[in-house]
Image: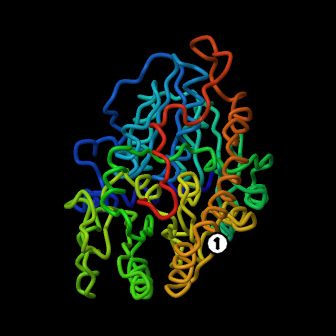
Amino acid sequence: MLWRGLYRSAVGLGAPLLSVYLKRRLARGKEDPKRFAERRGLASAARPEGPLVWIHAASNGEAMSAQPLMERLAARDPAGAILLTTGTVTSARLMASRLPPGALHQFAPVDRTAWVERFLAHWRPDVGVWLESELWPNLLWQMRDSGRPTALVNGRISTRSFERWRRTPGLARDLIGGFDLCLAQTPAEADRLRALGAADADCVGNLKFSAPPLPIDPDLLAALRHAVAGRPVWLAASTHPGEEEIVADAHARLAPDHPDLLTVIAPRHPVRGGAVAEALRSEGFRVARRSETPTPPADAEIYLADTLGELGLFYSLVDAAVIGGSLIRGPGGHNPVEAVQLGAVPLLGPDMSNFETVAAELRAAGGALGVVDAGEIANAVSRLLAAPAERAAIANAGGQVAARNRDVVARVMARLEPLLPAPAAPVPSEPAPSGSASPAPAPPREAAGGAR
């Protein structure tokens, strides 16, 4: 209880600074002005009648991992409700068209006691499911104090985070040890969670493998393929500041041997598109932006995919994709399964700590290539462009890894079942498979040598 008092006192004393911080986020476009009240626990929707399962997913990656879980929950109880909370504007936009029937989205309340109380009093969730690693103390404490079960699913705790938690063992035991169910992404992370107080932490696989393929509009993909017909094309997906320069360097190394080369860069945060374009143009590159030009002009060297929700289009367009967030230290890499599912060979940088096991399994199976810098990226892309058969073999190996792990969501659901409220409607005899609500698959890739 000491930690609770200290934390709540600190949050109370810091309330003026917190208000200033939130206003700055709002001014920078990092909060939704129309839904800003949700961050203070004021709901913008009525609570549906009947049982309600609450899932908290911090941002885009966690929300995508939650999608197959939400689909299984909706199939289990068609008359029940699912509340998904996230903390970012991009994740809210991303999930706007992907929620299954019976699910709705709200922004998570900031972790002030009064705001959390307001949120929980309105929504009255029957169970709370946390995805990965964003553990807000007041949310957890108040859920548990009300007697409602809580679960950590696809829990992620890096070595660095583990060491930080070990400095406050009492707080760690209070937060992590209080989960009724604790499922980690990897056996190693389950061990770390047990060391921090989660007595029954276990691993049934990584839920990210069960996420449905990214959505694709076949007509838009056909238009892109027509625009780049005959050109070698590769992608740098979900890049962070500092990575675009590395990718541009790789393009410069590739260009002498591939004069028609088109490099597609999809910034992790599309709002950076203008700044990235300006920086690349200042280095002498011919740059076009998808937000301004629907298809790449013939003279463009770099095409910025600075739109939201279209990454699937570009994974389907290319043969090779650098996974952003992995070329520099800090972000920890993004989900390479998204590339694998759509037939692109993932090129993994040195920091894939967020997807350590996924990356290791893909590498071990020969379904991904490791790269360290611009030179290695250029060599890998050149190799894949020159050897369609080798590229296809690597892509196939990655696809087999994804297929082997696709049923993780079923194992997660089996472990969650004892915590879930009784269905409001009869349970279907056969639950809908994960991804059943996802858009139609992309048109098949063209044969080697044709338009891609």
Assess disc 1: are there few (<14), some (14-19) or many (≥20) residues with their C-alpha within 10 Å of its C-alpha. few
What is the total number of numbered labels drawn onto the structure image? 1
Q: Quadrant of residue 165?
A: bottom right
Q: Report x, y in % for residue 152.
A: 64, 45
* 135 in relation to 192, above or below: above
Task: Give the residue displayed 29% in from the left and 68% down from the top.
Answer: 272
Q: Note whether residue 171 is visible.
A: no
- Residue lying at the far left of the rendered structure: 292
- Residue lying at the far top of the rendered structure: 426
The quarter of the image holding the C terminus is: bottom left
Image position of 353 (left or right of 284): right
* 61 in relation to 297, above or below: above
Q: Quadrant of residue 429?
A: top right
Image position of 311 (left or right of 365): left
Q: In this orientation, which residue lies closer to the viewer: 446 or 430?
A: 446
Task: Give the residue displayed 70% in from the left and 39% down from the top.
Answer: 412
SS state under label 1: helix
Q: Report x, y in % for residue 118.
A: 40, 35
Q: Report x, y in % for residue 311.
A: 41, 55
Q: Which residue is mark 1?
A: 160
Q: In this orientation, which residue lies closer to the viewer: 410 or 452?
A: 452
Task: Give the residue displayed 59% in from the left and 72% down from the top.
Answer: 387
Task: Give the residue displayed 47% in from the left and 48% down from the top.
Answer: 214
Q: Quadrant of residue 246?
A: bottom left
